[in-house]
Image (tube, rainbow, N blue to C red):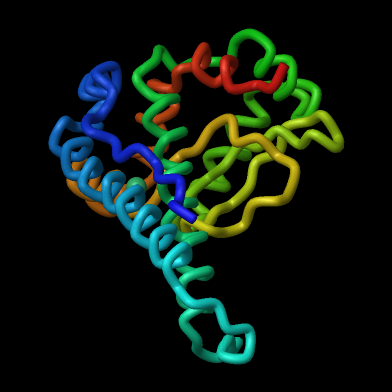
Amino acid sequence: MEPRLVTVPEAIPAKCYSTERVGISKATHDNHLTLWKGYANKTNEIRKALAGMEIDPAAANQIYSQMRALKVNYAFAYGGLINHNVYFETIGGDGGPATGDVATLINEAYGSFDHWAADWRATGMAGRGWVFLGYDHDEQRVHTYIGDAQDTFPAWNHTLLLAMDVYEHAYYLDFQTARMKYIEAYMQVIDWSAVNSRIPR
Ligand SMILES: [Fe+2]
């Protein structure tokens, strides 16, 4: 069966370049595009490999096997694509306190925007790759998660509303190792209307 392929991103959304006003540069975004494309291309490569392989359950092995390599790396590749889709979709805005329905969800879950923002900053310093704001369909609440990599640590039955990349490639060019400065800059350019449009209705 022919695999369904993902669309490889061709450009960073134009609105993202407005982040230059807070120090997140065009050069960072342009380099980041190469990585974003890589996740999409590898997603497609793995989908094709899975579609084309002769599946032999007896050959599959948890230590090393073709199936293990493809499935483990698929989660990293497709996870990386989705995380970056959301990252670039939800920056390039005016930042500041949340607006609309996501503001209500944040207040319900965290008591106030300031409390959530402190949690978000701290999670950003505690994570190795990502910070995720997920909408939990079971509890109908939002929760902030650490993502140490492209494929960790989401919970099931969530919609990803906001994703902050804290891998060094997202900030080292502009802020060197001062990650908190990057997080502060990022929080000034969150596009809350884009976040609201991701809330399931
Ligand atoms: Fe990234």
In the current view of this chain or complex, which residue is farthest to the top?
Answer: 100
The C terminus appears in which quarter of the rendering?
A: top right
Q: Is residue 198 above or below residue 181?
A: above
In the current view of this chain or complex, which residue is farthest to the front?
Answer: 1
Q: Nearer the viewer, residue 116 or 19?
A: 19
Location of residue 200 in the rendering, given as x and y in whole percent from the top left corner: 69, 22
Location of residue 195 in the rendering, given as x and y in whole percent from the top left corner: 54, 21
Location of residue 6 in the rendering, given as x and y in whole percent from the top left corner: 40, 42
Residue at image coords 51%, 55%: 127
Residue at image coords 39%, 15%: 93
Location of residue 98 in the rendering, given as x and y in whole percent from the top left corner: 58, 16
Q: Quadrant of residue 57?
A: bottom right
Q: Nearer the viewer, residue 56 or 148?
A: 56
Q: Nearer the viewer, residue 89 or 19?
A: 89
Residue at image coords 39%, 24%: 91
Q: Is residue 59 above or below residue 50?
A: below
Left or right for 171, reference 83:
left
Q: Is residue 10 above or below residue 3?
A: above
Left or right for 157, reference 64:
right
